[in-house]
Image (spheres, rainbow, N blue to C red):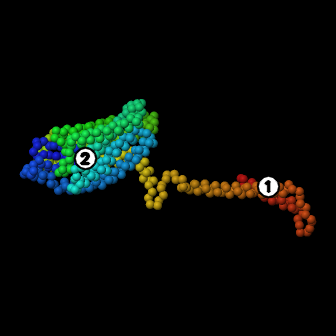
Amino acid sequence: MNELLEYELNATTMDFESPSTTETINSISTFDSYTTTEAASQDCFNDQAFLIFMYTTDDLLLAASMAATVFNVMVIFCAVKLFKRSGDTMHLFILNMTVGDLILTVFCHPNELLIRKHDFLQQIHLCAVVHYFNWIGLAVSGLSLTMLNVDKLIYFRWPLNYDRSMSKRRAALFCLLIWSLSVGFVTYCWAFDIVYIYEFDCSLQMSRGKKFYYEIFLILFCVLPVTSSLIVSIYLFNLTRQKRNSSSDGHTNAFKTKVKSMVFIFATTAWTSCSLLPYRIMNLARIHLFAWSELTCEGKQAVNWVAWILVYLLTINPIVNPVITALIYAPYRLTIKKFLVNIPVGNRPIYSYQGDNLHSDSSFVSVRRGRNRRSSSTELASLRQSTEVVRMSMSDSPWTPAKSPGTKTEEEFAFDKEKKTMILRNQLNNLES
């Protein structure tokens, strides 16, 4: 998938027509054979250092896209879980933005990099699908970032109207509107042949007389959303800092949580602005401000290097976005940490912060104390039973056996009974104490 930095040698101006995530710098001739001028221009791009840089970066980005896919899935899981728990509409917009990034990292970027590397993958239908979803992913991600900043603007600027202005139902409608606008615009461009796939390098081209659709896409779905988000984010960052410094003790926990979320929103917006805006602005400037054919070979090489660096920076954007969300925003960081800790490894049991089957040292002491208490109670009951037996025997009529030299007298027998009773009472008192 290539966003073409196309230059036609028979034209007077540079034509940067095809919008997508990355771009190919190719010399496309409308003639059947190359002229001497065209061949000389092609030599400007046969820099071995640049080719090594491009192939190495493509391989690294392919691996990074696979890793970012895992982070995007975890962020989506956290967004759904946190929205169900708290009902904060911010998580809906994070979910929407992350789904747009997931489309880019799981499908568009890997296919784009592989298509550029392997010629047999340069199929028109495959390239058309990749370009189609690339435009949708970029549009959804940019508009969702704007709504994320608008949500926080309403909360901090008009807090009394926040619940009415940004309810769950209204936030869901905004998300559906974002998808409707993105899919509708991109489908219109594909359905009415405003764009087409160039067979030479599988790049996306604009039909003649309809090139302004690319500029509409750049401005409405890329430049304006990111620029407005940056302005709103800077304003909110300064506003929340002033409120926090004015009366830190009078704020509720909900307000403090919202203030902490602004750090994440500001970081995401700043990163998106630094990674997306430079290439988009440069692309618009090359269309309107200078002619590609008037540049020297060294100038074309310099522009080629700058353009590709900015394109790779644009490609890294959806790769870094979920990492920022997972590391900076505390609820997502803690949820992901808890999820990773609870994953069983081999025969290791699932870890639990307060396991029901795990006992501390104090719990074993309690168990031993319970057992000793039960054994003491049993012994105490038996002693009480023995005491009752002795008392019953004392209340009976005295037994007077026949006197004989080998038997005890009645007084001796009574004395023995009283002695045993006193011993039992002493033992009973000791146990009760």
Residue 289 shows in the view: yes
Give the percent coordinates (x, y) of residue 327. 37, 48
Q: In the image, is residue 415 above or below residue 329?
A: below
Give the percent coordinates (x, y) of residue 28. 14, 49
CA–CA distance between discs 1 and 2? 96 Å
Give the percent coordinates (x, y) of residue 381. 73, 55
Give residue 14's quadrant in the image: top left
| Structural crowding at the residue carrying mark 1, measured as other residues with C-alpha within 10 Å and reported as few (<14), some (14–19) or many (≥20) | few
Three-letter residue code for mark 2: His
Q: Residue at x 71, y 53 (%)?
A: 433
Residue 402, numbered label? none
Residue 155 shows in the view: no
- Determine the secondary structure under disc 1: helix
On the rendered structure, is 405 left or right of 110? Answer: right
**Tag nearer the camera, 1 or 2:** 2
On the rendered structure, is 433 left or right of 330? Answer: right
Give residue 222's quadrant in the image: top left
Residue corresponding to mark 2: 131
| Structural crowding at the residue carrying mark 2, measured as other residues with C-alpha within 10 Å and reported as few (<14), some (14–19) or many (≥20) | many
Q: Residue at x 85, y 54 (%)?
A: 395
Q: Nearer the viewer, residue 373 or 120?
A: 120
Q: Nearer the viewer, residue 293 or 173?
A: 173
Residue corresponding to mark 1: 388
Asked if labels 2 and 1 touch by Cβ distance under 8 angstroms, the answer is no
Three-letter residue code for mark 1: Glu
Q: In the image, is residue 106 above or below residue 285?
A: below
Q: Residue reaching furthest right?
A: 403
Give the percent coordinates (x, y) of residue 161. 40, 30
Q: Residue reaching furthest bottom?
A: 406
Count of numbered labels shown in the rendering: 2
Q: Nearer the viewer, residue 346 or 400?
A: 346
